[in-house]
Amino acid sequence: RHEMQLPYTRAGSVIVAVNPFTWIDGLYSKHMRMIYSDKLVWRPTQDALKSLEPHIYEVSSLAYKGLIMDGGKDQSILVSGESGSGKTETVKILMRHLATFDSLKEHMMALEEEQQLPNKLMVSKQKKKGNLLRRASNNALKRMSSLKRYSSFKRTPIPRISTSDTRSTCSSSTSCEHAESSESLLMPSKTEMNSNAVIDRVLETNPVLEAFGNAKTARNDNSSRFGKFIQLQFHVRDFPISKCELAGSFCETYLLEKSRVVGHEAKAGERTFHIFYQLLSAPEYIKADVWKGLISTNQSSFKYVGHTETNIIEGMTDAERFNETLAALDLIGIRGEELENLMRALCCVLQP
């Protein structure tokens, strides 16, 4: 299975994964999430699992199903394994699936409606074909008889209508209705926008945890040096349809490897926590704003950090990671003076 790029298998109800150490195209696509969501949650069958390949999405799907359908009980997912086995990435994959379940259902229903629309139109045309043929001659005669009467009048221009809802101008009531319905399909509602904001805050703040809690070890470039308990909080709604929206999250960390701050096996290629390398790779003007002592410094300037040959973690440089960390901090409201104090506290830790 590993050679065929099938990293998952089942051991009873447990999903076992072998880290392929490469990103497999299509394995975690939106289409794949929709397949497992549909067959295990929205339209489940008794033998659904037999028709599906083992996948981490079946874990998230069954957890969501238990939350929304099977009595609404709280669900738990345990991700365990040795260093480098892929626990961190697995958690991110699970969280993204769980957080976007509701939008996946809406997207799936929209696709099905698009596929059924041509068939509906064909059926409708066949039913009305006879009536259209019978009325064609009558309508033609009516248009011909009234042509002279209407041509003698100047048509009154229809006023342009402006609405605050659609924020557009329309030349007729029909086009206004079309514009309003079209925009309502394209523009998310306030509830959807708030929901999307919550999802973004939950999913896009992971760089903060990785910056302050992950480090390069001899076996893993982005190893979590702490344990974490993540609680996704959902709002379950039964009317008018069963719906389960992500409302927030809670993250508790424990067993942080604090000793790594003052020592790591540099000869074995290890590093201390990512955030220190990110800060030292920041632009000079940012380093000057944080602390003048950072100007013109590098990794070798501080004993607790030291020289390293590794400046790229999972395809991104430390400088790029620093920008990602700042964006994630801003997303959770850490900016301005609070951000400066946080960076200065890191400078204090750097001093041996």
Image: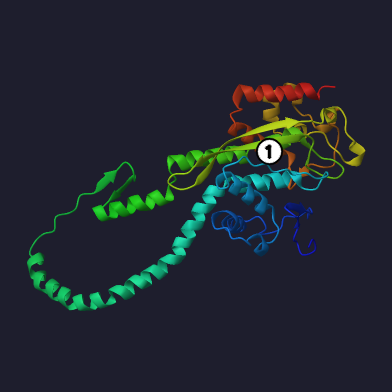
| Residue 196 is at least partly visible in this image | yes
Q: Residue 271 location in percent, x, y? A: 84, 36
Q: Nearer the viewer, residue 230 or 49?
A: 49
- Here the colouring is rainbow
The residue drawn where x is 62% and y is 58% is: 32
24 relative to 130 in the view: left or right: right
Above or below residue 169? Residue 331 is above
> In the picture, which quadrant includes the N terminus?
bottom right
Secondary structure beneath dot 1 equals helix
Which three-letter amino acid code belongs to the residue tagged 1?
Pro
Q: Residue 123 location in percent, x, y? A: 36, 72
Q: Residue 6 location in percent, x, y? A: 74, 61
> In the picture, which quadrant includes the C terminus?
top right
Q: Residue 293 location in percent, x, y? A: 76, 22
Q: Quadrant of residue 46?
A: bottom right
Q: Nearer the viewer, residue 317 or 25?
A: 25
Q: Quadrant of residue 318?
A: top right
Residue that extends furthest to the right in the rendered view of this protein: 267
Q: Nearer the viewer, residue 313 or 252?
A: 252
197 relative to 20 in the view: left or right: left
Crowding at mark 1 (Cα within 10 Å: few <14, some 14-19, many 20+):
some
Judging by the rendered image, the residue that carries numbered circle 1 is 207
The residue drawn where x is 29% and y is 43% is: 163
